[in-house]
Image: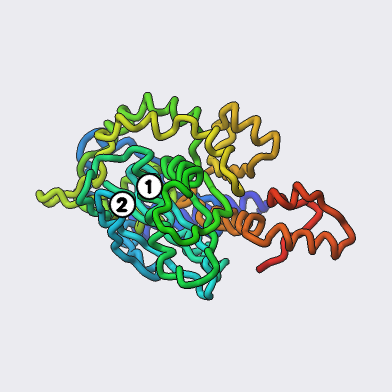
Amino acid sequence: MSDLERNLMKSKISESSTSSMSSSITEEDEASSNEPEIESTKTIKGIPKFSGEINLGQEFKPPRNRPPKLRAYTPSKWSEYWSSETIAALSTPESKFKIYYTPPLTNSKAWFLFHHGAGSSALTFSASAKLLHDALPHVGVAAFDARGHGDTSDTGDDADLSLDTLARDFVHAVAHIFQSQEESDDCGEVVFVGHSLGGAVVTESALRFAELWLSLRKRPVISGVVVVDVVEGSALEGLAHMRTYLGTRPPLFRSVSDGIKWHVQTHTVRNAESARVSVPPLLRDTGNGKVGWRTELGATERYWATWFQDLSTKFLRVRAGRMLVLAGTDRLDKPLTIGQMQGKYQLEVLPEVGHFVQEDAPMRFAGLLEGFWGRNRRGAALEVQRALNAHGQGATASAVAAGGVPMAASMPKQ
């Protein structure tokens, strides 16, 4: 018997035994039961394809004859990823913002501060933020629910999601995080990371940081700005289809677990483990035994175009390290294409992931942030120069001043 015949025979035997063990489990349920833990830099595979059984625009009802996969779609606790949470009264008019954070393990005043996209929440960064802090324990990580999102409760204008208001909220959240450390002479440093709409918010905040910072004390230094999967050109073009997309989402789910399942099966979030913590804040009890969407995105339509206008130009004007992380190479518009060719920012593309890059590939995303921090933190240019001198090489003053890292040098680990 040839090797090929042996392999075919083994395959048939395996299929026969699997079928006899559980004839009631469908192929789709087997795929969902094999969904990975928080992935370790591998592309997520084995997630079931969208079967078309969901009635678009209607309540999501999983087929009744299929046993629920409790672990795959059971909500996770935020405390598995962050060390603390707090409610902070910020902005004018005052709103109570939910903030999740893990502080530095040392006296360092260095932080990564995250801003989520429209309709999302702070917990979309849970997996990647935890991995980042594990790799850089001397750097803190924090994210908050924007007004009208997640567990933030608004006593002011819940519907005001203008870019100016969102930028002010974000800077006020940054100030709140640094308040407990203001007694230090070190003003600290931050890296802003924004996904989708959050990318426009952190860019606007970085450009207007001095204007929006209310405290008279020293402001932290912005070491870098990271924009995740949003480009002005494609974002503005996509707005024409936003209403159609919102109409395809089920308005109601029978439970939060069903909401998690919908996100995974439609590939909205391709990492089931991340969806278990990121999806629950997106849903609210409707009072009739079902759950619906926390944020009414349709009501914010008047702001859609203003969110992304001039985003590319603003991003290139930021006076800090810049990185753009995309899920595909076809999304660069003309200004960013020219800027990338001129080396004005770092471009990273993660293939085979969806729009929620930070959830679909948290390990790879955290690795990019760790490398970005090593190249752009304060003192990095000085360490590069020392490394070059140790190897008898030189670097131009302009390159060092710009925070550039010559390819010949390896960045010392902090």
Q: State left or right for residue 192 relative to residue 157.
A: right
State the separation of the CA atoms marked 2 and 1. 7 Å
Q: Residues within 10 Å of mark 2 (few under 14, many from 20)?
A: some
- In the image as oriented, which residue stretches furthest toward the bottom? 106
Determine whether 230 is above or below 393 in the image: above
Residue 19 visible in this rendered orientation of the protein? no
Q: Which mark is residue 168?
A: 1
- Res. 344 image quadrant: top right
Q: Residue placed at 65% from the left, 59% from the top?
A: 374
- Label 1 SS: helix
Determine which of the numbered discs, if any, sits on residue 147 in the image: none
Q: Are marks 2 and 1 in contact (CB under 8 Å)?
A: yes
Q: Is residue 83 visible?
A: yes
Q: Earlier in the sequence, mark 2 or mark 1?
A: 2
| Rendering coords of residue 391 (x, y %) | 87, 62
Q: Quadrant of residue 82?
A: bottom left
Viewer-closest of 168 and 144? 168
Residue 145, percent from left and from top: 33, 53
Q: How many marks?
A: 2
Q: Which amino acid, by three-letter code, is at mark 1?
A: Arg
Q: Quadrant of the C terminus?
A: bottom right
Q: Which mark is residue 91?
A: 2
- Between 149 and 282, the one lying in front of the other is 149
